[in-house]
Amino acid sequence: MKENGIVFTSLVKDMVELKKCSRSPQSYKNHMHHELSIGIIREGSTKVSFPGETIEFVKGDGVIIPPKLSHMCSPDDVEHWRFDMLYINPRFYGQALTFEKAVRLSNPELIEDFLDLLNETSSQEYIEERLIELLELLSEDNSNIESNDDSIGEQLKSYIEMHWLEKIKLEEQFNMNRFAMIRCFRKSFNTTPMAYQLELKMAEAKKKLMQEESILDVCYELGFYDQAHFTKEFKKMNGLTPIAYQESVRA
C-alpha cells in the first residue's frame, strides 16, 4: 500500500513488514511501535528523542528501536528525508533475544544485506532464515541458548543429509519452533538449514555438470523451479555460471 510517500510490504504474514518512507512528516509526533523497528536512513538526517536521550541519525546509519519505546523524529529537511524500516512482531523471536535500547548501528551493512535479499527472492522460508540470522547478530543478548542445542543441531543435520533432495519441513518433523530450530542449527554449524541443504545440492550439481549432464536436466533433478534460479544460486556459491563452470572443466 502506498500513501503520502509511504509504502508497506508484508514479508512474513502477521509478523514482519517493511516500510519505505520518503518526504513524510508523520513521524514528527511522539509515538511508539508495538513492533521491534530495525532499519536504515536512506537520505537526510534526523534527531530522534527518546526518554532521557536524543540520538542523531544521518544517511547510511542503521537504526534499532525496541518495541513500545516512546520516541519522536525531527527530520532536518522533510523534503530530503527517506528511510527503510522493518517492523518485527516480538512474538517472532519471543524470549530468545533481547532488544531494550535504542541504538545507532556501527554495522548497518547487516541490515543492507538483508534488504538487498528481498529484491532477489520471494521465498518466505529463506527470508525468515536470514531475518533470524540478522536478529541474532543485532541482539543485545543471545546467550540464553539451551545446552542441548548441539545435539539437536546434529539431528537436524543428519536429517537434511538423508532428505536433501526433498522439500523438507524440519519444524514439523522435529516438532520445533522455527526460530529455535534455526538458532540451534546456526549455533552448531554457523549456517542455516536451508543454506546447508543448498550447499549439498550445489555439490551434487558440480558432479553432474562435470559428467556433461545438461544444465536443464541438472536444474530439475535437484529441485530448482527454473534454470534462472539454478544459475543464480550456482553463481552465488561458485563464482561462475553453470555454463562457464562446464567450459572451465572441459578446458
Image: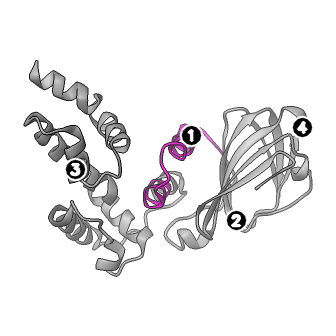
The residue beneath circle 3 is 201
The residue beneath circle 2 is 67
The residue beneath circle 4 is 78
Looking at marks 1 and 3 on the same chain, the residue that comes earlier in the sequence is marked by 1
**Helix, strand or loop status at disc 3:** helix
Residue at the image position 49 percent from the left and 43 percent from the top: 120
Q: Position of residue 58 (x, y in %)?
A: 75, 34
Gap between marks 4 and 1 measured at Cα? 23 Å
Gap between marks 1 and 3 measured at Cα? 27 Å
Gap between marks 2 and 1 measured at Cα? 21 Å
Compare residues 171 and 101 and report the one nearer the observer. 171
**Helix, strand or loop status at disc 4:** helix
- Give amino acid for label 2: Pro
Looking at marks 2 and 1 on the same chain, the residue that comes earlier in the sequence is marked by 2
- Occupied quadrant, residue 210: top left
Q: Position of residue 107 (x, y in %)?
A: 55, 38
Residue at the image position 31 percent from the left and 51 percent from the top: 224
Viewport quadrant of the N terminus: bottom right
